[in-house]
Image (spheres, rainbow, N blue to C red):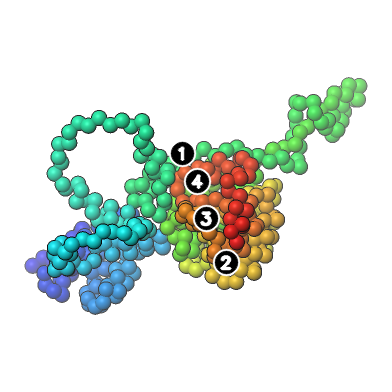
Amino acid sequence: MEPATRDGIIVPPSPTGDGRLADNIVFFARALRKAGLKIGPAAIADAIEAVETIGIGSRDEFHAALSSIFVKRHEDRAVFNEAFRLFWRSRDLVQKMIAMMSPVAPENREKEKPRPGESRASDALLGDREDRRPQREAPDIEIDARFTTSGNELLRRMDFAQMSAAEIAAAKKELARLELPLDSVRTRRFVASHVAAKVDPRATMRVALRTGGTLILPRYREAKEMQPPLVVLADISGSMSQYTRIFLHFLHVLTEKRRRVHTFLFGTRLTNVSRQMRHKDPDEALDECAAAVRDWSGGTRIGETLKEFNRLWARRVLGQGAIVLLITDGLEREGVELLETEMDRLHRSCRRLIWLNPLLRFDGFEPRARGVRAMLPHVDEFRPVHNLLSLADLVSALSAGRAGAYDPRRFLAKL
């Protein structure tokens, strides 16, 4: 008898004999692939073999076996966990029947916030059911859309952590269309000018030497203007994992459209990925960044990494009025004395320090964490960074002055 095959791979016989467990694993892998995980036929065969090797014990062991095979990137772990919860949940029909026949009490609890990666996982698992439903002929209804919101506007306001795979792809396209402002600063160097504002003695004497000094025509100069360096310090610890990949796409757009962009990633150590971000293809750039970083989705040591940056990189990249974008939630796990000292040193070394914190997406945010309270006095602006609208506001603010709406002093009053 020929062995059974699924997705072009040979599936070993199930220990139960009916093959349903192997079928479920294959279907689960297809759903993960649809949600954005990179899963091939070899990984499906390895997952079936791993489950047969360890046997069906506890739910945690089963989760660990599938996670070790299917999760190849740190940012995919949240999607895998949510898909596992939705696909392998218990289906107790007796409890469902009791719940259907029992009276329903009014729901007075606050609505639970959607989990990170929930929309991508549910869209991959349940999207086919919506497609298989018979199409009903809907009556023609006229809608007054003068005061409604377009789908593009909803996408701009949607949180990155709650986007589906299709919405993330659309968000990446919107990021590629960003038009960066031509902000500039005056440097100490001079360039030739046709405006009679300031005489250039050296250029005037060089021109006079050509005629033997019989005719002296003044030459003029003006201060040279150029775009300041943009230095990005991005947190890639576990608490920021839901935003890391979309932030890297945004940083790739900045690197592609702007000169002198220096990108540093940090968790427990500092990694310079400026060279990797210069690749034209964003996926290739992100893959090389993932290969260069060893502490992805791990812990965070903001004070130590800032100390390393100030000691090794500050004098190299923070010249000529540099702007620093610090992307982190400020959840420091160690002492804050070093963090406060290094934040003050970083603030004094740059022209403008902008802190981008995704925790500001919550209404009523208060700086209760020790790391947040230590960092706030040393930043010029405190901005949210969780959707396309906040990134567009940040791009516009790079050429404008300091915005009073994002002044950190409004949070310092709550300390």
Q: In whole angstroms, how far apart are the C-alphas of marks 3 and 4?
A: 12 Å
The crowd level at tag 1 (other Cα within 10 Å; few <14, some 14-19, many 20+) is few
Q: Can the viewer see residue 276 in this picture?
A: no
* Helix, strand or loop for disc 4: helix
Q: Which residue is mark 3?
A: 357
* Residue occupying the point 58% across, 55% down: 411
Residue 51: image location, x then y, percent: 24, 73
Q: Which residue is mark 1?
A: 177
* Helix, strand or loop for disc 2: helix
- Residue type at tag 4: Leu
Residue 272: image location, x then y, percent: 57, 58
Point out the residue furthest to the left here: 1
Quadrant that contains the C terminus: bottom right
Q: In whole angstroms, how far apart are the C-alphas of marks 4 and 1?
A: 12 Å
Residue 147: image location, x then y, percent: 37, 33
* Residue occupying the point 15% across, 36% down: 137
Q: Which residue is mark 4?
A: 391
- Residue type at tag 1: Arg
Circle nearer the viewer, 4 or 1: 4
Residue 66 or residue 292, whichever sits in front: 66
